[in-house]
Image: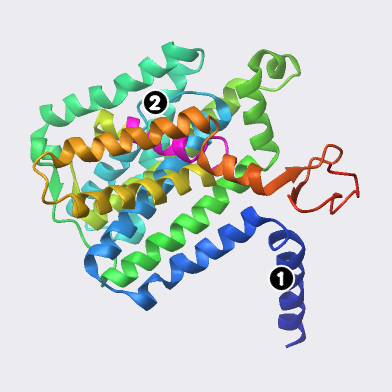
Amino acid sequence: MGLVSAYFRRGWTILRSEVLVLPSRLAVLLFIIALMAVPLFTQDYYILRILILTCIFAIFAASWDLLSGFTGQMNFGHALFFGVAAYVTALLNLDLGFPPYLSIPLGAVGGVLAGLVVGIPCLRLRGSYLALTTLAFPIILTGLVFAMPDITGGELGLSGLSRLTGSRVMDYYLCSSLVVILGFAMWKITDSKTGIILHAIREDEVAVRSSGINTIRYKLLAFCMSGFFAGIAGGLYAHFMRLAGPSTLEVSLSFQVIIWSVFGGMVSIYGPIAGVFILNPLMEVLRVALGNFPSLPEIRMFIFAGLVLVTLLFMPEGLIPWVRDKLENECPRCKLRNVFIRQRCRVCDTSLS
């Protein structure tokens, strides 16, 4: 009992001194509570379906930011990791009878291998050359999918996968828990020594290499980590939709993840997650609200494009960093963030005015 009490006091201390002192962290806490509380207010299949897909795409978007945002390795073919994991998961489930709790992690391993396949030949490429090279890989794999219909199902894909869990509510709790856990894991990676090195590679790779750090190893590590987390998303998608098809490798999906990340805010992990949770449900709301209009796709895309354009014009770093900078100030001395109403830093007592 004393041990439980000690852990409770320690947790409360961390919550009071590290979370409640900053609006951004408090907002994340409230978001997690609201996310977990959704089934208590509604168990509508349609609403839960939209939120489950949003959680899956949020993991996918954060995995792109882990690679392209922090390392600067601009990946225009990120759907490759998603699609490879979806197909590996489907084949393991349909042909070998693996349950989801085995097929999804093994599908993520397939995403890691795809990261190696892409990363090794792209290690010495930069800028537009790297982006165009990564764009080619999912296109090549799509051609292979169509060329081997006996294995991949061709244009129809592989269908009839096992369900994630026994109910839609449990599907929701699984995916919402994973977006929180994996999002936190990716954030901790970027906040560690490895994350600092990845960020340094993005800023000046030559300087990092001259300091004795093997940049090739870290870039390859970034490709593998990104492939793993994108693979988890791909496996979840395959089992939830009970389908793995060419749509999981489409170029449009790769560009969609970039739009989510840029809108929410790159180099943050939580920015792309927020971008998905804003834009994906918004598009569904517009689809329902504009259901009586014959030019529905054009109207939706016009609103979507206008929203992204306004964000890029007035918030070039993304929506979430812009809001955070309005609510918080960075201490010029210790570089810790403080709520904007404070006059002095909460740690080093330096003036913030």
Which x, y percent locates residue 56? 36, 51
Q: Is residue 285 magenta?
A: no
How far is the residue under mark 1 from the one under mark 2? 42 Å
Instruction: Tell me the kind of residue under disc 1.
Output: Gly
Q: Name the disc covering residue 207, or none.
A: none
Which x, y percent locates residue 79? 32, 34
User: For this view, does 252 lie left or right of residue 133?
Assistant: left
* 103 w.r.t. 156: above or below: below
Q: Find residue 199 and report its image quarter.
A: top right
Chief secondary structure of the magenta span? helix
For label 2, the SS is helix
Q: From the viewer's side, name the closer residue of 214 and 309.
A: 309
Q: From the viewer's side, name the closer residue of 166 and 268.
A: 268
Tell me which residue sits at (53%, 29%) in the image.
316
Image quadrant holding the C terminus, namely top right
Which stretch is magenta? 255-269
User: For this view, does 230 lie left or right of residue 123?
Assistant: left
Image quadrant holding the N terminus, namely bottom right
Q: Are marks 1 and 2 in contact (CB under 8 Å)?
A: no
Q: Name the disc covering residue 117, or none.
A: 2
Instruction: Tell me the kind of residue under disc 2.
Output: Val
Say which label, 1 or 2, has the lower sequence index: 1
Q: Which residue is mark 1?
A: 11
Which x, y percent locates residue 285? 27, 54
